[in-house]
Amino acid sequence: MNEIRVFQNVINGKLVSSSSTKTIESIDPSTGKCWATIPNSTKEDAKLAIDAARKAFPTWAALSAMERSEYLRKVGDVLSKHGEELAELETRDNGWVIRETIYGLIPSLTSIWYDAASRAAEGGRGETVQLGASAVGYTLREPYGVVVGITPWNAPLFTFTVKAASALAAGNTVIIKPSELASVSSLHYGAIIQEILPPGVVNVITGFGAEVGELLVSHPNVNKVSLTGSGATARAIAKSTATNPKPFIFELGGKSPNIIFEDANLDKAAFGVTLNGIFTGNAGQICVGGSRILIQRSIYDEMIAKMKKVIEEQMKFGDPMNPESAMGPIATLAQFEKVCSYIELAKKEGGEIILGGRYGSKCLQPNDSHLENGYWVEPTLIRVDDHSLRVCQEEIFGPVAVVMPFDTEEEALSIANDTEYGLGAGIWTNNLDRAHRLTRQLESGNVWVNTYRRVGPELPFGGQKGSGFGTDSVLEYTREKTCYIEIG
Ligand code: NAD
């Protein structure tokens, strides 16, 4: 029998037990079995983390940009050293396949730290203005103080990194509160980077959102909050920060369209909208998953045939620890039940399952029968003709995409924008005018043309409409102060 691993909070540079003896079980989604425990932290634990971050702030903020930059670069180095173990923990915790966590995720985290290191000076860059002959005015950019990063279960290491790296570069200290559903990799990550950072500069404390999360975001000694999560949590945070108002960044959900025109490279699009667009992105559990695929009617049948072929030939589905698997399980039992319920709803609403649609152990390969209690859902495509259906409007957050034909560019645009969300959108076309036109007209924080889901730390990533506002950039973690000086 495998031993259950025990993980602890990281506060003030040390591993710290919670004041509660209760723990939360971490479930391996490929087996449905508990493999680790994490602290069920209390409000008292959260206050310790705030005290540590507050105490560390003046010294960290007083470092020069060059000094902070040096620290961040070393964190990037340490991360590559521990990359394999971190990738394995992330895969075990939420089922994101190992070949993506090792070869995609870890290198991207390293580059985020290096990029933040190169931007540390940006955080202090204000402007100067001559005010007539006898005065000048200038602005200072200052760190806020203590930043709380609240992260989701679907991308714990990535969201930890984008928040912590930018906030630290700007001179803030940080508390990360990972999801109670997948905290292991973040707790371990937090422990590893203590090798480099002074105590209290980064603290990681886990527990339930309504308990620890609520205390952290509402506390008067926390100065800025960055949430990556659901709209419901964003609304709860907006409410609980009302007494001690503070700025926040909200990175929320999506229902992103991928629009394929008849003049596109169809083979490239077939791969881009299926494997890359949604399914290999943690089994569709990614905020920018292209979960609405719009296809021009003249190429509809040809495109569907190409998409099916790509999925059937290249989408090896199974044990996330197997380096050949391209898609693993759904991360939690609750999410599994939600995804399955949407497949059933789609059938009831009149959607036609054109690929996949099965869930549970019956969709596993015979040699994966030891994983029969895991949370498996096949890559699923559902043809719809009515965009008002709930499966077209609500975020499913799984390997399920709706497919819909359209006739004209205007119609495609209108369907694409017909959602409360505005996070990502893909355009597949060889018509440059159309690409530029639609890029402006799509109500989306990110638009990709003839590619999808490509991100670089050099560019901002954020949403519009119900997908949130703000980006985890260095400048967003600074506030401006204005000074006027008489010189005459
Ligand atoms: P969630 O909102 O349920 O939880 C996110 C975090 O908020 C967790 O750590 C949770 O404990 C905490 N939380 C819950 N209630 C809280 C409260 N009252 N106060 C403070 N913290 C609280 O989201 P989830 O289910 O973990 O993640 C999935 C969602 O995240 C999806 O909607 C997805 O689209 C979104 N997401 C967005 C992005 C992006 O960059 N836009 C990236 C990844 C995920």
Image (cartoon, helix red, strand yellow):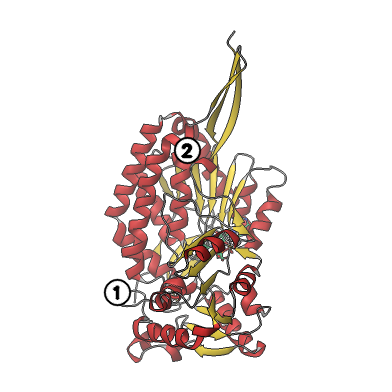
Asked which secondary structure carries label 1, the reply is loop
Q: Residue at x 60, y 39 (%)?
A: 221
Q: Pick whichever, 51 or 474, lies toward us.
A: 474
Q: Which residue is mark 2?
A: 170
Q: Amino acid at mark 2?
A: Ala
Residue farthest to the top, as pictured: 488
Residue 274 vs 211, above or below: the answer is: below
Q: Split into 4 quadrants, where in the image is the N terminus?
A: bottom left
Q: Amino acid at mark 1?
A: Pro
Residue 328 vs 24, above or below: the answer is: below
Residue farthest to the left, as pictured: 81
Numbered disc total: 2
Q: Which mark is residue 36?
A: none
> Which numbered disc flags the more N-terminal residue, 2 or 1?
2
Q: Position of residue 126 (x, y in %)?
A: 52, 30
Using residue 12 as the reference point, say whether residue 244 is left or right of it.
Answer: right
Pointer 1 local density, CA inside 10 Å: few below 14, some 14–19, many at least 20: few
Give residue 140's quadrant in the image.
Answer: top right
Whole-Å distance between the Cαs marked 2 and 1? 38 Å
Q: Mark 1 near ligand 1 (CB under 8 Å)? A: no
Q: Quadrant of ligand 1?
A: bottom right
Using residue 136 as the reference point, say whether residue 188 is left or right of it.
Answer: left
Q: Position of residue 313 (x, y in %)?
A: 34, 85
Residue 28 in view in this figure? no
Residue 145 in view in this figure? yes
Q: Pick whichever, 266 or 482, lies toward us.
A: 266
Q: Pick whichever, 205 or 142, lies toward us.
A: 142
Q: Mark 2 near ligand 1 (CB under 8 Å)? A: no
Using residue 437 as the reference point, say whether residue 316 is left or right of it.
Answer: left
Q: Residue at x 68, y 43 (%)?
A: 245
Q: Which mark is residue 323?
A: 1
Give residue 467's quadrant in the image.
Answer: bottom right
